[in-house]
Image (cartoon, grey):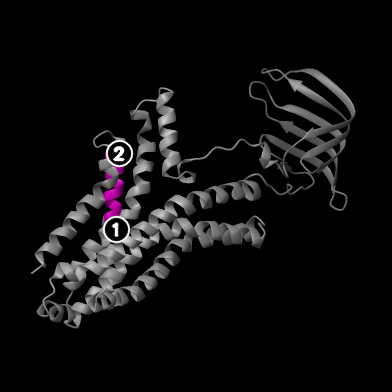
Amino acid sequence: MKTIDRYILNELLQPFLFGLAFFVAIWLIDLMMELINLIFSKGVPFSVVSLFFLYSLPPTLVISFPMAILLGTLVAFGRLSGDSEITAMKAGGYSFGRICVPAIVSGLFVTGLTLLFNERVVPVANDKFTKLFRREVTLKRPLPQITANRFFEAGPGRKFFVEQFDPKTRDMFGVVMYEGQPTNFPRVIEAKKARLDDGRCTFWDGRISDFRSSGSDYHHTYFSVLEYPIDTHYVNPDDVPESKNARQMNILELYAHIKDLESKGLTEKAQVQNWIEFWTKLSIPFAGLIFVMVGAPLGSQTSRSGTSIGIGMSVVIIFLYYVLMAAGKAFAKGGHLTPFLGVWMPNILIGGVGLWLIFRLKA
């Protein structure tokens, strides 16, 4: 490695690390608001919320790596240009293409790092996040707020009315429960006393009434003690069937999933979304290399150097990249482009512009 290569790599390192911290923080702001809401409004323990945050870092890093190398390249080459160091390097016999080599190597390194994270770390993190969220948030509900002489919900399709309530023993008196039925009027359970506890409701001294669709009752069942599953507090997550989505699969698993669906007769048109996800897993990592190719010549042409200029230019380029990505995916879903071309369109177009700018400044 020549001195010029080490020098340019050192120039890239600091703004790259700053860009990584900057973009990670930007992406995590919305997540932090949601996590804080889980703590204060849903009572999720801080230790669980910390795991949510930890599992959210790998996907955020995958998005931020290419953005950070873009910012680093713009800032580094902007400073080199502003201090006339690129002119001095050219005077020393180095072409602009040769000056860009360390940056392109850095782009390849970031591409490989992003691909490694996307394959080995992100699917595992997404899977753990999904399972933990289902276990600690989706399938856990607090006991309902019980108030005398008011209706309250206790699970899907069930409404209670109580005449009296003892908050110490949590005993309810003069209880009526309405349970929705798919075809008939609600089933009604009336009892002198009841108590909600651990996913069930125990009724004492009452009757169950079933109604016809016309509204008339046709069946009564009397009981002294009745235990009724309510599922207001806890549902066992182990009883819920698991299935991976595309975000929880790596490239090989997703490809095998696509081929398995094809063998079962699913048409190519029906598989468009899966192919879009497949090519996205490859195209996003290569954005790091593409951003270097366009960032180096653009940064070297700025009349002023500085982090603020680099941030502004990087935001514009990133915005353009994701607009092209969204448009390409929309064209692919509409059948106007293949999934490959739709997803890779921003890499092809922006990469082409970057190559043109490098060769234009090669002299």
The residue closer to the viewer here, 256 or 272, is: 256
The residue closer to the viewer here, 271 or 205, is: 271
Q: Locate residue 157 relative to residue 73 in the image: left or right.
A: right
The residue closer to the viewer here, 153 or 264, is: 264
Q: Amino acid at mark 1?
A: Phe
Is residue 309 at all visible to an observer of this figure? no
Residue 169: x %, y % from top left: 88, 50
Q: Which mark is residue 319?
A: 1
Residue 115: x %, y % from top left: 39, 54
Q: How many residues crowd around disc 2 within 10 Å: few (fewer than 14), some, or many (20 or more)?
A: many
Q: Quadrant of the N terminus?
A: bottom left
Magenta stretch: includes residue 328: yes
Residue picked out by circle 2: 339
Marks 1,2: beta carbons within 8 A? no
Residue 89: x %, y % from top left: 15, 78
Residue range of the region highlighted in magenta in the rendering? 321-332
| Identity of the residue furthest to the bottom in this view | 83
